[in-house]
Amino acid sequence: MSGRARLALTAAAATLMASCALLPLVSPVTWLFQAAFLVAVQTGVGAAARRVPLARSLTVAAQALATLLMLTLVFARSHAIAGLIPGPDTFRYLGDLLQQGSDDVSRYAIPAPLTPGIRLMVVGGVLVVGLVVDTLAVTFRSAAPAGLPLLALYSVAAGLSDGPTDWLWFLVAAAGYLMLLLAEGRDRLSQWGRVFGGAARTPGGRESGAVAPVRTGRRIGFAVLGVALFVPFAMPSIQGGLLDGAGTGVGVGDGSGGTISAVNPLVSLRDSLNVDEDRQVLSVRTDSDDASDLYLRIVSLDDFDGTTWKPAQRHITGVPGKFPTPAGLGADVRRTTVKSTIAAADWYAQDWLPMPYPPSGVKVAGTWRYEPVGMTLVGDHGQNTRGETYQVTSLDVQPTAEQLAAAPEPSAAMKREYTKVPSSLPSVVAQTAKEVTAGSVNHYEEAVKLQDYFAVTGGFQYDTQVEVGRGEGAIANFLKQKRGFCVHFSFAMAAMARTLGIPARVAVGFAPGTPQADGTVSVGLKDAHAWPELYFEGVGWTRFEPTPTRGTTPSYTVSQTTGSSLPDETLPSKGASTAPSASASQSDSCTPQLRRQDACASPSAAAAVQSGDGGPPWWQLGLWALGGLAVLLVPLSPMLYRQQARASRLGAHDRTPQGMAAHTLAVWLELTDTAWDFGILPDESQTPRNAAARIVRLGRLDPATAASVHRVADAVEQVLYAPRPRPTAGLADDVRRARAAFNGTVGVPARLRALFAPRSSVRVLWAASAGRARLRERLAAARPTLRKPSEQEG
């Protein structure tokens, strides 16, 4: 075999050896065998072209053409001419497949499944690197620069892998490169004459000096590999950046210091919210009295450059046994200690540790580091949450609206770091913030007004299909379009708060999950969330919730602050009269218990006519009037019943917790009855959340109305499942909005039927039937007692 052919085979082997670094990233590993065969064909085409011989440029062109034909045959056969020749449709299909592979890479955790897109990316990437290595090392006879594409291939794999065998793949890739250098050296030496050929031996069987350069080269190569492998373990180093095994920059390994420079964790948040299957990420068992307010915070984003929010570069230390008191938290603020046990799914590999905020202690296995400013934990040397179970002690801080309103101005250092906004931020952001918070007398009122603007009064719609948005005008565009998801709402509110002089940052993590029958809380992919945190001196970093239909509204923001759209649920309505009612009050809700008591019956058809002097003529006139009125009201009684029931359910209610709960259930009943009137039959076997989704889907409701329906469902789940349900304002308006939307989506006949012959009026007959059944049960129970004396006499 000629020296050139041997060098070509060595170049192919070096490419495949460097490609082994990709093995931990994708499963199964069958792609490597396919790539090896295609690289062998590519190498053979190059060897044949050089043997002809062809010019160097034609040799490279022949190999490139062969590579394209092989990719077409393997991945786009049905889109090619005669199954082999690529055409315009072939390139479009390959482009779409590459885009699909890119999406799959961002969606799946390591090891990712071998989807068609990912297969094209890895096999095509190996072929491209193989072509470049063969061109440099063999065609142009320069093996040293061929190490650059090999290094690029290894670096991409090493930057994504977090396994304990990364050193092995480095050893394999480095050995391949050294083999390539050695093969090129032998080829060059062989051209200098017989003495450097390396094949002769002395009569005594000993090697001659001809092989000395080869033996020396091997020894140097082994020495270099040893230095590269073992010296880093004996020396402290700063790891980090995009290529760190954990996806974060982690400092020196002794736990005494270092820095963290993290990548943006929002890359996959939108994909998590849009997954078809809501897979469980975390299972939480907590002793908190109200798990519906248990947000799990991963990391805080405090560096705002006008385009996006990202974590700032921070100093990290070893994990302390007991965490310090959160910055700014005063002794007079009420707090309780909460203990939570969190179990991560075995497929969920997160570099940061999800914890309730603020944490005061954590027990977790593995190598983790502590970032004091954000009070977060980040994995060191590839450590992540995959399959971890850990215990977190945290504080449930419960400030009052008065404490937040009386908070003094933050320190100059705090304002300098956390109120910075770039000069490139569009002026409409600050202008809108001033308009929304006009008339506020302190930062707390401004914060509540900002929250209400996004969540209630501003006309914003929750939509996960909207792109995250980039560029300096992203926030301004969101304020104009008024459509987005948690990233948009949290980014915009935090930026607007900073323009008002309120220290602000964005937290990323999970909203409260779903309570389970075994007492745990299940947190899924669709619970991924982002929310703003605003700083108040004496209280510290405080959560706000501007995203409509997501999470829970903090209790300290539901106040009677001037201009706030959220009323104080503990106070009666301003227009409510304290005088006793002249008529008996109607039930606020038609629960099954009230239905069995006939509490949902329609009002009386007519009122009694009182006369001043009596007499047969007036009595007879009264009977005739009642008869005539009955003839008119009987056909209209379903409509009148629904109007009365609607007014009762959506009207005034007691502001006590019991009254609020009854009102919420009554509003939910009115919502389901409204949908029933328009043809959507109720399904009491479903949860409120699923029932709301069914109403939205079958009713073809627009996003704003869908958000209102889900708000009501969320409030019902609070009443049914939360230990201390939080009051939700505006539910009656949500139901009225849904009814108006139903009227707009159906035809005239359906609207008329819903008005004059509503289907839900059958509840009156159900109540009457239940009353008769109860009466029969009472009579059946009384019969033995009535017969007993006669039996004794016999």
Image (tube, helix red, strand yellow):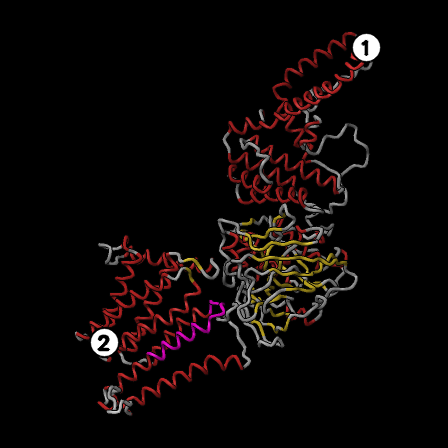
Mark carried by residue 358: none
Q: Quadrant of residue 55?
A: bottom left
First along the sequence among labels 1 and 2 = 2
Q: Which residue is mark 1?
A: 793
Of residue 59 and residue 578, the one placed in the foreground of this image is: 59
The picture places residue 595, in percent across and down from the top left corner, at: 68, 28
Tell me, yes or no, if residue 253 can be seen here.
Answer: yes
Asked if residue 175 is among those painted magenta in the image, a careful observer would answer yes
Name above or below for residue 417 compared with residue 342: below
Circle 1: residue type: Glu
The structure residue drawn at horizontal position 60% and vertical position 77%, both measured from the top left corner, is 254
Asked if residue 135 is among those painted magenta in the image, a careful observer would answer no
User: Which quarter of the image is occupied by the N terminus?
Assistant: bottom left
Q: Is residue 679 left or right of residue 724?
A: left
Q: Quadrant of residue 413?
A: bottom right
The picture places residue 399, in percent across and down from the top left corner, at: 74, 57
Residue, far top: 616
Q: Which residues are magenta?
A: 159-179
Mark carried by residue 56: 2
